[in-house]
Image: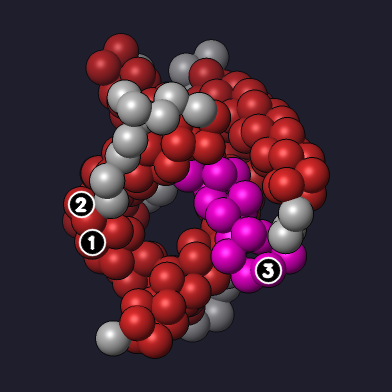
Amino acid sequence: MATSHFFNRRLHSLLGIIPVGVFLLIHLTVNYMATRGPEAFNNAAGFMASLPYLYVLEFAIIFLPLLYHAVYGLYVAFQAKNNVGNYSFFRNVMFMLQRYTGIITLIFVGWHVWETRAQKFFGEEVNFDMMSSILSNDFSLIFYIVGVVSAIFHFSNGMWSFLVSWGITIGPRAQRLSSIVWMVVFVLVSIVAISALFAFIG
């Protein structure tokens, strides 16, 4: 049982980075093309949509790993005992936020897929105009900002956990430095992502 739990935690951590985390960064890069105008974004989105065996790639490389990461992540989140009230130090807070942002991200991703990717089956084209229409509503814009920032935090803090659990950052000094690096990454990537969202609404 302990061996199975150890394996599941390792696999959950790995899939959160490769391929799910990598896909997040690629997706944010495509979105950032919106800051260069509708044509630049449409070209980038069109290139991604034209990849060969797209549905196979999405199912095998994105959907299945994301599903496993999400299901096991929910199990961990509801099993976890947060002690922030008793031990309010930095890592305990980050532990708590990792669980909360995971749940927020799961809700956001589900809704985002429905609003965009799923609409292709109803004949809609995923382009600049679609995203502009979605984000023109104030509630949707706030929801997307919260969702995107949660996803980036979950990835960035998850990278810290990944490096620890895989024995890459072992000592306290290495872990402190890793905390700083990944929080800087979180802030910088969040700025990029939010600027992309606002680019859709001019």
Which label belongs to residue 199? none
Q: Helix, strand, or loop for circle 3?
A: loop
Residue 160 falls inside the magenta stretch = yes
Please tell me in which quadrant of the rendered image residue 76 appears.
bottom left
Q: Which residue is mark 1?
A: 75
Residue 62 x/y as whole percent: 44, 69
Residue 144 x/y as whole percent: 37, 29
Direction from residue 197 to residue 59 in the image, left or right: left
Q: Which residue is mark 2?
A: 78
Q: Which residue is mark 3?
A: 167
In front of the other: label 3 or label 1?
3
Callout 3: 10 Å neighbours few (<14), some, many (20+)?
A: few
Q: Is residue 190 visible?
A: yes
The amino acid sitting under disc 2 is: Phe
Q: Which residues are magenta?
A: 154-168
Residue 178 x/y as whole percent: 73, 45
Q: Residue furthest front?
A: 86
Q: Are marks 1 and 2 in contact (CB under 8 Å)?
A: yes
Q: Earlier in the sequence, mark 3 or mark 1?
A: 1
- Is 155 in front, or is 54? 155
Label 3, label 1: how far apart the Cα atoms are: 23 Å
The amino acid sitting under disc 1 is: Tyr
Q: Helix, strand, or loop for circle 2?
A: helix
The amino acid sitting under disc 3 is: Gly
Callout 1: 10 Å neighbours few (<14), some, many (20+)?
A: few
Q: Residue at 37% x, 66% y: name it.
A: 69
Label 2, label 3: how far apart the Cα atoms are: 25 Å
